Image (cartoon, grey):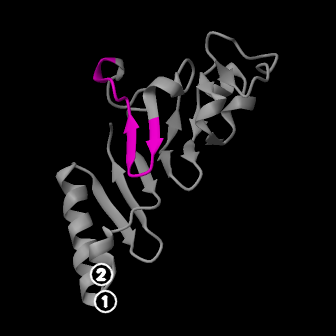
Amino acid sequence: ARGNGASAPPDTDPVAAPLFNAGEHLTFTPDIRRMSADQLSGVEELTVSRSNVASVQFHGVTDVRGVDFDSVMRLEVGEVLVYPDARAKPPKGQGLNKMATITMYQCWPPPNERVHLDAAAQEAYKQKIRKMTEKKNALFVDYNFDTGVWQFRVSSF
């Protein structure tokens, strides 16, 4: 399935056009759904997001021609997967397998840890998130206890 059912722009090569399913509720910034094949070969600072769930900002220029977003990206509460099937993953630096900043929303502590937290306990929880991030070979950027927003960077997927 393609996009929101709208046809591709007239100068877009249908083979090069990225694939995405309207049911996934993904937002693309800039809007790759309106780009020509030439523009799709060099999208700057592409951000793929799912409202109130997560976003992934791919740094630099990204070639999204032929990328099947339905199969290579999954944004769920508490989980962001890019290339869940390792066999589909291109070499580092190609496609979506590149440096990116991930922002996850609704990342709350378990209810039993959240009830009686003071500033020191919040900082301890933030350090726990930092260690968990680093164990996954990612660079911790921030965790906001009040908003439940966790942000980190990866060099590739």
Q: Can the viewer see residue 98?
A: no
Residue at 70%, 30% in the rendered image: 33
Relative to 13, 75 lies left or right: left
* Residue extent of the magenta highlight: 74-87
User: Within the magenta stretch, is there residue 86?
Assistant: yes
Where residue 102 sits: x, y (%)? Answer: 42, 51
**In the rendered structure, are the residues bearing label 1 and label 2 in contact, judged by CB atoms less than 8 Å apart?**
yes
Numbered tag placed on residue 119 in the rendering: 1
What amino acid does circle 2 point to? Answer: Gln
Relative to 97, 24 lies left or right: right
Residue at 46%, 33% in the rendered image: 73
Q: Quadrant of the C terminus?
A: top left
Q: Quadrant of residue 88?
A: top left
Front residue of 82 and 24: 24
Q: Quadrant of residue 87?
A: top left
What amino acid does circle 1 point to? Answer: Ala
Where residue 1 sits: x, y (%)? Answer: 64, 18
- Crowd class of label 2 (few under 14; some 14 to 19; many from 20; radius 10 Å): some
Residue topped by disc 2: 122
User: Within the magenta stretch, is there residue 149?
Assistant: no
Dot 1: what SS?
Answer: helix
Residue at 32%, 69% in the rendered image: 109
- Crowd class of label 1 (few under 14; some 14 to 19; many from 20; radius 10 Å): few
Residue pushed farthest right?
10
Where residue 58 sits: x, y (%)? Answer: 48, 43
Where residue 5 sits: x, y (%)? Answer: 75, 23
